[in-house]
Amino acid sequence: MNSITKLTGIAISAVFLFAGPVWAEGNAKLGKKVFNKCRACHALKPGKKKLGPSLHGVIGRKAGSESYFKYSPAMKSSGIEWTEENLEKYLQAPKKFIPKNRMAFGGLKKKKDRKNIIAYIKSISK
């Protein structure tokens, strides 16, 4: 193997090594499109209530804690903090993650969609 081939292989490996974590976190631009499934019920402006609470700043917030919104008893008593990991699990199957909560949405089955929407929510919450 000549040195150019070795360097090319190293360069390609480096791209995948360093790009992997960024890709695993999700793509906010793609998440914006996925959020269209949520837009009818959730706003992204702080404090704006729709059928569901605003999702602005949801990451790091305790579930059922926005004072302006009437949550289900299940949500209020869940004790969950909306970490990216918990949000990803909830978005996969809301009724399974927090039984008896009021969210009617069935969930996002594709992991990439969940990761992308979380990236989008993070990007608008800055």
Image (spheres, rainbow, N blue to C red):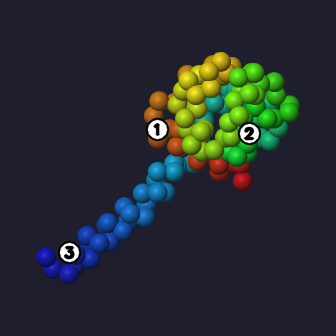
Q: Which of 101 and 35 is in front in this view?
A: 101
Density class for disc 1 (Cα within 10 Å; few <14, some 14-19, many ≥20) is some
| Marks 1 and 2, the one that precedes in the sequence | 2
Label 3: element kind: helix
Q: Do the residues labelled 1 and 2 touch (CB within 8 Å)?
A: no
Coordinates of residue 37 in the picture (x, y in percent) = 59, 29
Residue bearing the label numbered 1: 111
* Separation (CA) of disc 1 from disc 2: 23 Å
* Separation (CA) of disc 2 from disc 3: 52 Å
Q: Is residue 68 left or right of residue 29?
A: right
Q: In which quarter of the image is residue 69?
A: top right
Coordinates of residue 81 in the picture (x, y in percent) = 68, 40
Instruction: Specify the label residue 5 is tagged with.
Output: 3
At horizontal 65% and vertical 51% (from top left) the residue drawn is 123
| Marks 2 and 3, the one that precedes in the sequence | 3
The correct choice, above or below, for 116 with respect to 68 in the image is below
Label 1: element kind: helix
Coordinates of residue 33 in the picture (x, y in percent) = 56, 38
**Residue extending furthest toward the bottom:** 3
Residue bearing the label numbered 2: 62
Closer to the observer: label 1 or label 2?
2
